[in-house]
Amino acid sequence: MNFSCKVNPKGQITIPSDIRKKLEINENDILMAKVTEEGFILLEGNPKKISKDKDMLFCILEETFGSFKKREEGHSNEENS
């Protein structure tokens, strides 16, 4: 079954309630997002299985900000070309 999601001005989407209920996703749960080569966004992880300790969260933040930095560097290099 397909669902539509609208992107708000902050770039956020709401996961439809049917999906949240089925996957038992609750407020403040952490999901891992990645983009496939085909251009799909995958959300991974059973929220009950993802550790919420500070070391895990720190690693997630480092990966996220590292990818943002790489993207910005690539964008800057394209502008300078």
Image (spheres, grey):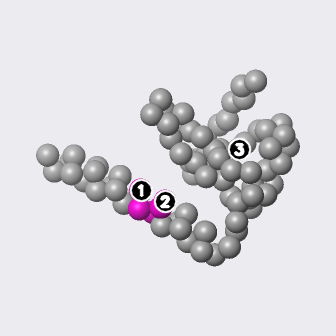
Q: CA distance from mark 1 to mark 2?
A: 5 Å
Q: Main secondary structure of the magenta part?
A: helix
Disc 2 secondary structure class: helix
Farthest top residue in view: 1
Mark number, residue 64: 2
- Going by the numbered disc 3, the residue's amino acid type is Thr
**Residue drawn at (75%, 58%), measured in percent from left and top?**
49
Q: What residue range appears in magenta?
A: 63-67
Residue 24: give x, y in percent of width and height: 83, 48
Tell me which amino acid carries mark 2.
Thr
Mark 3 vs mark 2, CA separation in Å:
20 Å
Residue 77 numbered tag: none
| Residue 14, disc | 3
Looking at the rendered structure, the number of numbered marks drawn on it comes to 3
For the residue pair 51 and 78, the one nearer the viewer reads as 51
Please tell me how crowded label 3 is: few (under 14), some (14-19), or many (20+) other residues with Cα within 10 Å.
Answer: few
Residue 55 placement, left or right of 39 = right
Q: Write the residue at 76% across / 24% down.
A: 1
Sequence order check, earlier mark of 3 and 2: 3
| 55 in relation to 28, above or below | below
Dividing the picture into quadrants, the one containing residue 30 is bottom right
**Label 1: which residue?**
67
Instruction: Assign a secondary structure to mark 3.
Output: loop
Question: Residue 55 falls in which quadrant of the image?
Answer: bottom right
Q: Nearer the viewer, residue 27 or 12?
A: 27
In the rendered image, residue 39, in percent from the top left (x then y), is placed at 48, 32
Marks 1 and 2: CB-CB under 8 Å?
A: yes
